[in-house]
Image (tube, rainbow, N blue to C red):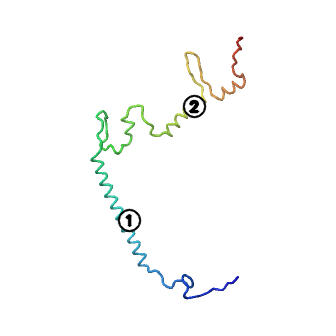
Amino acid sequence: MSIETHNDPHAEGHGDFERKDIRSSGVLYFFVGLVVVTALVQLFLWGFYRVLDSYFRSNETKVSPLATNVPKDTRAVPLNYPEETFPNPRLETDERTQLDGIRLKEEQTLNSYGWVDQKAGIVRIPIERAMDLVAQRGLPVRPEENA
């Protein structure tokens, strides 16, 4: 193995380091151009969206005459608009919170005492207590019928 280096001044891509540094004005012009182009693109997009907004505002579909309490701009829904306006049944607006409420209510029902039908004397007991009673007493069995 050889550790010799060959310094051939005529070899392409080999040899010494670059003797000429980059000028800072080129980098500065690049960044100024980048800022100018970014500003022009933002200005173009702002104008483009204003044109689209005015177009869609002028071509907005007519609201049904049966609808009441309709906001002026139907493209944006005001806060609490569905709760105040739409009749039941409504679509879910926050499924996770609504489902958590249902599950919490079911959990409370499973783990508490209460009446199912007070007139008939039917009560509800916690599920843990019901499982203990089934383990102690066993399940009811039907008598066999003779064929």
**Which amino acid type is marked by label 1?**
Thr
Q: Residue 107 carries which label?
A: none
> Residue 105: where, in percent of width, then height?
54, 32
Q: Is residue 107 left or right of residue 65?
A: right
Q: Residue 38 carries which label?
A: 1
Q: In this view, does 108 lie to the left or right of 69?
A: right
Q: How many marks?
A: 2
- Closer to us: 116 or 26: 26
Which quadrant of the figure contains the N terminus?
bottom right
Q: Note whether 146 is above or below 67 in the view shown.
A: above
Q: Note whether 32 is above or below 137 in the view shown.
A: below
Q: Residue 124, located in which quarter of the rendered image?
A: top right
Q: Residue at x 69, y 24 (%)?
A: 134
**Disc 1, SS:** helix
> Residue 11: where, in percent of width, then height?
56, 85
> Residue 50: where, in percent of width, then height?
30, 55
Sequence-first tag of 2 and 1: 1
> Residue 45: where, in percent of width, then height?
34, 59
Task: Give the residue at the far front of this rendering.
Answer: 11
**Is the C-beta separation of discs 2 and 1 under 8 Å?**
no
Q: Distance between the residues labelled 2 and 1?
A: 58 Å
**Disc 2, SS:** helix
Q: Is residue 127 left or right of residue 75?
A: right
Q: Which residue is drawn at 69% across and 84% down?
A: 2
Q: Note whether 130 is above or below 104 in the view shown.
A: above
- Closer to us: 104 or 74: 74
Q: Is residue 127 left or right of residue 146?
A: left
Which quadrant of the figure contains the C terminus?
top right
The crowding category of the residue bearing disc 2, from other C-alpha atoms within 10 Å (few below 14, some 14 to 19, many at least 20), is few
- State the residue position of label 2: 108
- Closer to us: 68 or 122: 68
Q: Residue at x 69, y 27 (%)?
A: 132
